[in-house]
Amino acid sequence: MTIGERIKELRQKNDLTQEKLADYLCVTYQAVSKWECGLTSPDLSLIAPLTKLFHVTADELLGLDNSENAKRAAEIEAAYEKTWKTGDLEERYKIAEKAVAEFPGDMKYLDWFAWAEALRSFEFEDDKTYADEQEKAIKHFRCVIENSVDEEIKASSIQGIVQYLDFRGRSDEARKYAESYPENYPVSKDQVLLTCLHGEEAEALRQKMLDRALLNLVNALHGNRNIFSYETAEKVMKIMIPDENYQYYHDLLWYNFLDKARLFAAEGDAEKTVEALHKAYYHSAEFDRVIDSGVICYTSPFFNKVTFNTSELCGTGTTTYVENFFEALDRNAFDNIRDNEVFAAFVEKIKGF
């Protein structure tokens, strides 16, 4: 409804003629008629008198009813979400365009519109239109970044501007925005940064991300605390580090084999317990060596650009990992097989080293 239509509705609701309303406002009835026909709008100075006369708020008079706005926003958002299932980019663009027109200044909708512009750019065959559309998107992404108070919306526009600045050959500018991307979002900062890196830099970051993913996967498997999960963790590390230059991963492997040994001991299987303990001892000794190495490098093709400075490790005690291994042997986890000949012989031999 236009403001004229709302004035007409409220006038009739209050049982007023155009002439009577004109008299109350000290205007001509022709002026009221023009408002109601949509030919003109009342002067700003008449808004307050109209609200008092009709007993409504200015928002209601101007059609700014929050409940209606919320309803309309919900309709727009439902239509927008639907396009992600249909894949209709042109419809998504039209909906986003309508959203920014009906809700000017809403940064969420401007972020929508920028993404719609950016994705739509690939539909244009001529280079100029393709470039122009991406530049428009970059401008709108920048507006969201500079004005949004919602960090999630801002993060979305940072992803967009990084990607499309890089497309336009402005990698240095893209990188500055990538560096401002917040941590701990579903799309990681490294993923955003990767979109604007190339060559050796991109490969080094990709390996770093893979290293972190492997570390998280192995820790998650270890948390299941069962034989199958421990053996899966070993296989995954063997695949990713086929040359067995495990470096930092010796730490995870020694715990992995020690926990396997505890489970085998609980089952009374001395031979499997000893087999696991042999490997736990080896990896504890290797990790002690790694700790004293300073900067370490991997030789696996998956991680040959990854380095790690062991001086950055946080100490959790003054004992070595081998000493921790020997302490673990004396704990009650192995009481079930402590008198077993195979286990007893292993303990005597290993402590003699």
Image (spheres, rainbow, N blue to C red):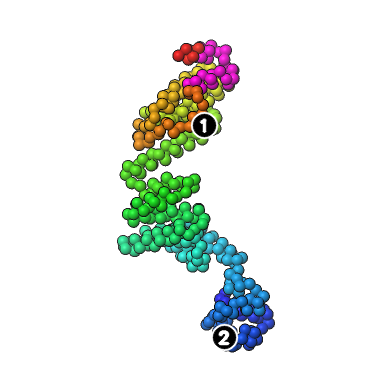
In the image, residue 201 lies at what x, y percent?
34, 43
Give neighbour class at mark 2: few <14, some 14-19, many 20+ (Cα, 10 Å).
Answer: some
In the image, residue 119 lies at what x, y percent?
40, 58
State the residue in front, 319 or 241. Answer: 319
State the residue in front, 29 or 68. Answer: 29
Q: Name the residue beneath numbered marker 1.
A: 222
Single out the mark in the foreground, 1 or 2: 2
Identify the secondary structure beneath mark 2. helix
The three-letter code of the residue at mark 2 reads Ala
Tell me which residue sits at (41%, 26%) in the image: 292
Q: Which residues are magenta?
A: 322-347
Tell me which residue sits at (47%, 49%) in the image: 182
Is the magenta region chiefly helix, strand or loop? helix
What number is the disc on residue 31? 2
Q: Quadrant of residue 200?
A: top left
Tell me which residue sits at (51%, 35%) in the image: 220
In the image, taking residue 187 as reference, residue 167 lies left or right, namely left
